[in-house]
Image (cartoon, helix red, strand yellow):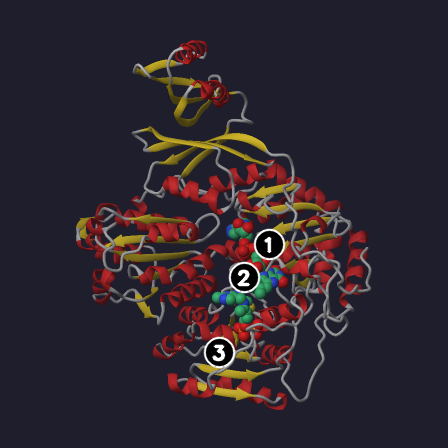
Amino acid sequence: MSPLKIEKGTSRHSAYDLRDPHAAPEETHTLAVVVDNEAGVLARVIGLFSGRGYNIESLTVAETDHEGHLSRITIVTKGTPAVIEQIKAQLGRLVPVHDVHDLTVEGPAVERELALFKVTGEGEKRIEALRLAEIFRANVVDSTLKSFIFEITGTPQKIDAFAELMRPLGLVEMARTGVAALSRGAR
Amino acid sequence: MKGQMSGARMVVEALKDQGVDTIFGYPGGAVLPIYDELFLQNDIRHILVRHEQGAVHAAEGYARSTGKPGVVLVTSGPGATNAVTGLTDALMDSIPIVVLSGQVPTFMIGNDAFQEADTVGITRPCTKHNWLVKDTADLSNIIHQAFHVATHGRPGPVLVDIPKDVQFASAEYTPPERARTSHYQPRVKGDIEQIRKLVALMETAERPVFYTGGGVINSGPAASQLLRELVDATGFPITSTLMGLGAYPASGKNWLGMLGMHGLYEANLAMHDCDLLIAIGARFDDRITGRVQDFSPGSTRVHIDIDPSSINKVVRTDVPIVGDVAHVLEDVLKLWKAGGRKTNREAVQRWWAQIEEWRKVDCLAYTPSEKTIKPQYALQRLQELTKDHPRRYITTEVGQHQMWAAQFLRFEEPNRWMTSGGLGTMGYGLPASIGVQIAHPDALVINVAGEASWLMNMQEMGTAVQYRLPVKQFILNNERLGMVRQWQELLHGERYSQSWSEALPDFVKLAEAFGAKGIICTDPADLDDAIREMLEYDGPVIFDCVVEKHENCFPMIPSGEPHNKMILGENASTKDAIGSSGAVLV
Ligand SMILES: Cc1cc2nc3c(=O)[nH]c(=O)nc-3n(C[C@H](O)[C@H](O)[C@H](O)COP(=O)(O)OP(=O)(O)OC[C@H]3O[C@@H](n4cnc5c(N)ncnc54)[C@H](O)[C@@H]3O)c2cc1C
Ligand SMILES: Cc1ncc(C[n+]2csc(CCOP(=O)(O)OP(=O)(O)O)c2C)c(N)n1
């Protein structure tokens, strides 16, 4: 039981917890959010993340149901389990949001990203770039005597790995789509 | 079938179909077609405020005191931006508000047209949802949706931005029953398995406490009724946040008083020491929890809330119950009665004995004075002289006076107490009192104010006089930004930077200038008569109650302390009570 005696305040702390209350290890989660494809819906989702200080690692969006005017937003985010739970709850209460799926916890999922790489160079480096592209199953979609554009699809990790290898071989520009993801199986 | 009509006409028809009898607004170029339509009808009363912020706060007062949504009409650009503080206030306090704003014609949007502002962009983060209407054919449907969203689930403000060409063009009207209220249907019934767990915990708890909040008021009168039944039947103690006052009557025998930063000693210690914490429509605000890791360390926590994002946001909950308070409490009572109305009576009795010990501390005690009016004394007298009024409504501004009002006024019914809790908006109280009085013409409506807050929206006195609203502005005038001054004393080494009010108006003359009655009182011996004079006057009154200038509001849970450590008046020296790192947060 608490003492009845009232102690005089001599504390050096703040009334609020200045330490991060969610100081647990961070996790990366992929969320699929089904929304009404109406004006401002993306601003709403992005505003939620920036306004509440959540991370966006990648974000893709496109209308997936033209008749129902529904779009699917795939967001890769990072946070402690408590923050991830808040993100899902906050997304869920947006009026145009129909569904929030956490593909990271809802069983196995397929994640793919598409990237385009422009690599310039001549001689040995050019040949090496082409050889590595073959190993990574990247396609050449444009070529000049001094450059290639490769198209590659895969997990973000695979694309990161390809980028690492291309850098010394003359990688000058890269465009990535961000992750698209679906859960595996018949569900 | 109402058939084809102009967009402006549609607005009025849709409001009528939504049962709206009053709107608060201010005209301008971009809403003139709607004002034309208002002019042509008599079903909806338009209250002309003096500033759009006042319109939203008035609508909040209207909404909170009736349970119905408040409706506001403003013009584009500055009309809409002036409404932003009110929208944010309503969002923080979960008040259902529908704001209709005019916008420049669709073909001029994006051109920096006269009085153009990106209203949906600006208000996106401070509304529950908003819409820009681009086609008259969608207008009535969107207005019906707006009412649906504002009032379902966790209530909140919404905004519909209506370009002027959309108001002029004609289309087919959609009645409410044919409107697409979308997929937005938040669940109201709680999970029965979770409710069963709560009942089992209630049956064995030794030190239970109900921690209730604004969600009980949001849920409606039935929720307060069920809460009263549950509390009385179980015999458990109950405390409430600032926003929930009145849901359980202050005269009820299980009432502990408000909890939190300026809450009662017994309420905060009960929260700290309880073994079962039942949160009902309350959101574990930082004014409640203090230091989160020391918050109620030994309790099992149950949280009933309609908004899943409120649960586990601040503290971990053991038994989350997502649903509407009234629906959930009905099931709780049913199951608990069916289970034989069991509680751990002996232990709960011991718990009450402990609470009685805490009560003896008499945490609201203050040093009386015969020379100056103590603010606490002024409120005690106000309570005494108004308590028998059958329909007393109180609004407040923000600051010390607000906390004293929460501590010393006693609320027996829900929807009688209107205050800005989450945003803490100075300037809320006067317009809110106007909204309340419009909704309840025969009621006694008093705004307990600080002089600094009151000045922030004092132009609304004009509205009170125009509509002959007998609102009583009870100003506890300490010539200080009292709450700021108190923090400077406790946290900033008594450096009173910019925290006093200079060049204050003569409030009696000010009242007269507005065409209201002014009363000034400086002597405690005259106070009762002066208050009676205010109450008896049939019209708006500004009451300048000149109070002690340096009174601090206690109890106060000082920086860095959990619930079981707090400063009480007189008993503790407040000087240098808090180290400088405590000054980081507000
Ligand atoms: C100067 C100042 C000092 C303050 N000091 C204190 C203090 O000492 N003590 C104090 O208590 N407050 C204090 N406050 C107020 C504080 O800032 C918060 O506004 C308040 O504590 C929040 O109250 P609440 O938890 O009841 O939540 P509200 O803001 O009322 O939120 C209601 C909760 O209920 C839920 N809800 C809504 N409708 C329903 C429904 N139908 N069914 C179920 N759930 C529903 C919502 O989702 C939400 O979680 C102070 C404010 C100011 C300006
Ligand atoms: C719009 C706004 N600006 C600033 C504040 C910060 N603030 C909180 S209380 C307060 C002083 C209020 O003074 P007064 O209205 O005289 O009330 P008192 O505390 O003296 O009772 C201030 C400036 C606020 N809450 N709202």
Question: Where does label 1 land, which residue?
Answer: B285
Compared across the picture, whether B207 is left or right of A39 comes to right
Q: CA distance from mark 1 to mark 2?
A: 10 Å
Answer with mark 3 or mark 1, whichever residue precedes in sequence. 1
Q: CA distance from mark 3 to mark 2?
A: 19 Å
| Chain to which mark 1 belongs | B
| Secondary element at image label 2 | loop
The spot of residue B256 in percent (x, y) is: 69, 63
The spot of residue B281 in percent (x, y) is: 57, 52
Identify the image quadrant of residue B421: bottom right
Question: Where does label 2 land, which residue?
Answer: B421
Q: Are marks 1 and 2 in contact (CB under 8 Å)?
A: yes
| Chain to which mark 3 belongs | B
| Secondary element at image label 1 | loop
State the residue in front, A127 or B48: A127
Ligand 1 visible in quadrant? bottom right
| Chain to which mark 2 belongs | B
State the residue in front, B441 or A153: A153
Mark 1 burial class by Cα count in 10 Å: few <14, some 14-19, many 20+? some
The answer to whether the residue bearing label 2 lies less than 8 angstroms from the nearest atom of ligand 1 is yes
Question: Where does label 3 land, which residue?
Answer: B473
For the C terminus of chain B, the image quarter is bottom right
Compared across the picture, whether B149 is left or right of B397 comes to left
Which-is-in-front pick, marks 3 and 1? 1
Answer with mark 1 or mark 2, whichever residue precedes in sequence. 1
